[in-house]
Amino acid sequence: MSDDTTNLADSGCVSRRNFLFGSSAVVASSILLPALPGTGGKALAAEMARYPRKLVGKLSSLKTNEVQHFNYPDDGSTAKSVIVKLGTPAGGGIGKGRDVVAFNALCTHMGGDMRKTYKSEHQVLGPCPFHQSTFDLQRHGMIVSGHATESLPQVLLELEGDDIYAVGLIGLIYGRYDNLKG
Ligand code: FES
């Protein structure tokens, strides 16, 4: 695994992700994220799983704060994802500026499609068209506001030359009990 996908515990960002992964994950492992305020100083365990590698974009084609769409880990209706170059370092970010991140774009509350809701001024996805939840893309998709209680699933990325590959997920895609079974 590259440094780009193992720096989550060092990123200074936080997330709350407690869920079960299905048995079809290629590799599932836990990472520790720094404690959230109000959690008594306890580090939080987050689960990430590696899935089949998929080419999802070219680094040279990304412009700061312009969102591109792709599907991962399959082409199912709930695999809708976005990739964006934030222009500032982000948890799990790849590239020279560690600022390229990707997320499944279905709201974790009730599945609202948020692919077209990116707000560059705050680097968030949202508000969700259904009930206004908003998620921080700089901090692993954690909730900023709204009804959702789980962070957006973050797509783990790796860079090989100019090619960007999706290689796994942190979190469970809305509507799935297993990220590989849409
Ligand atoms: S579906 Fe997004 S806030 Fe309810």
Image (spheres, helix red, strand yellow):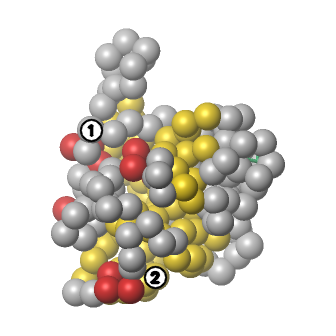
Upstream in sequence: badge 2 or badge 1: 1
For ligand 1, which image quadrant applies?
Answer: top right
Residue lying at 74% horizontally and 73% vertically, measured from the top left? 77
Query: Residue 57: percent from the left, percent from the top?
Result: 42, 84
Determine which quarter of the picture holds residue 40. Answer: top left
**Mark 1 = which residue?**
12
Which secondary structure, mark 2?
Answer: strand
Q: Nearer the viewer, residue 4 or 180?
A: 4
How far, Cα to Cα, is label 2 from label 1?
26 Å
Residue 56 tag number: 2
- Kind of residue sitting beneath label 1: Gly
Q: Is 31 above or below relative to 117?
A: above
Q: Residues within 10 Å of mark 1 (few under 14, many from 20)?
A: few
Query: Residue 181: percent from the left, percent from the top?
Result: 67, 68
Q: Nearer the viewer, residue 45 or 8?
A: 8
Query: Residue 32: percent from the left, percent from the top?
Result: 31, 37
User: In the visual, does 3 lie left or right of 25?
Assistant: left
Q: Residues within 10 Å of mark 2 (few under 14, many from 20)?
A: many
Residue 17 appears in the rendering:
no
